[in-house]
Amino acid sequence: MTAPRAFHPLARLLHWTMAVLVLAMLFIGVGMVSTVSPKHQWLLAIHKPLGITILLLVVLRIIVRLRFRPPALPADMPALMQFAAHASHWLLYALMLGMPLIGWAMLSAGGYPVMLGSSWRLPAILPASPVLFAWLREAHQYLAYLFFFTILGHMGAALYHALIRRDDVYPSMTTGFPASVEAAKKPPENIGPPPPDVLPPSDNAG
């Protein structure tokens, strides 16, 4: 089977949709913990259904990732960089999966309802426990920091591939047309007349 040159279109759609949602989620989370104004309840009402949406999308994304093989990293990438790339990807998947679940468990332990809209209430996944609530609240907070710095590293790596290495990694997740394919379509540059020594003998005779 030929190795794919780009991510499947559904994988790319999920990637960019979730990128927007996760960044919005992080900023909403920062806003929630930094204000006690009436906006806190408004942000909280967005935070819960958005977290469940991310949870559902990441499950779908993992299924797509396992169903459609992603393109391989460039063969000339050092082994350490390839290891870091794979590790950071799976760390992002783990955080996208774990953060909503921990938030859901935290609210369950605190006895708070997880409402999706005005009437749809999700069931509690943990019994009420003040100790467990405090522990999960700390875990949710510190994992949010880890999530933020992992995303920064992921964005830095994307820019490194797009602007410095200029390999197939970045376009394989954006346009779907690897850079090497685009380069092959372009006509060669600086095409001038052939040097005199390669012209036919009649032309050289002058």
Image (cartoon, rainbow, N blue to C red):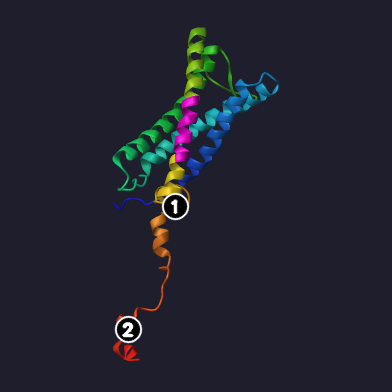
| Residue 201 percent location from the top left of the image | 29, 88
Give the residue at the far right of this rendering: 38
Asked if residue 8 can be seen in this view, the reply is no
Q: Quadrant of residue 24?
A: top right
Q: Secondary structure at mark 2?
A: loop
Relative height, residue 60 to residue 194 (above, below): above
Estimate the spatial distance between the alpha carbons at disc 1 and disc 2, rounded to whole Å: 42 Å
Residue positioned 55% across, 29% down in the render:
26
The residue singled out by tag 2 in the image is: 199
Depth check, front residue: 53 or 17: 17
User: Percent from the top left, x then y, of residue 65?
Assistant: 39, 40
- In the displayed structure, 187 sits above or below 174; it is below
In this view, the residue in front, 180 or 7, is 180
Q: Earlier in the sequence, mark 1 or mark 2?
A: 1
Rendered location of residue 74, percent (x, y): 33, 48
Select label 1 or label 2 by which is in front: 2
Q: Nearer the viewer, residue 142 or 194?
A: 194
Q: Is residue 153 magenta?
A: yes
Q: Which residues are magenta?
A: 145-156
Q: Residues within 10 Å of mark 2 (few under 14, many from 20)?
A: few
User: Which residue does the image show at 45% across and 32% down from the upper left?
Assistant: 150
Q: Are marks 1 and 2 in contact (CB under 8 Å)?
A: no
Q: Is residue 91 magenta?
A: no
Evaluate whether residue 171 shows in this view.
yes
Q: Secondary structure at mark 1?
A: loop
Q: How many numbered marks are there? A: 2
Q: Which residue is mark 1?
A: 176
Magenta-highlighted stretch: main secondary structure? helix
Residue at left 54%, top 12%? Answer: 110
Q: Residue type at mark 2?
A: Leu
Amino acid tagged 1: Gly
Q: Residue at x 36, y 78 (%)?
A: 194
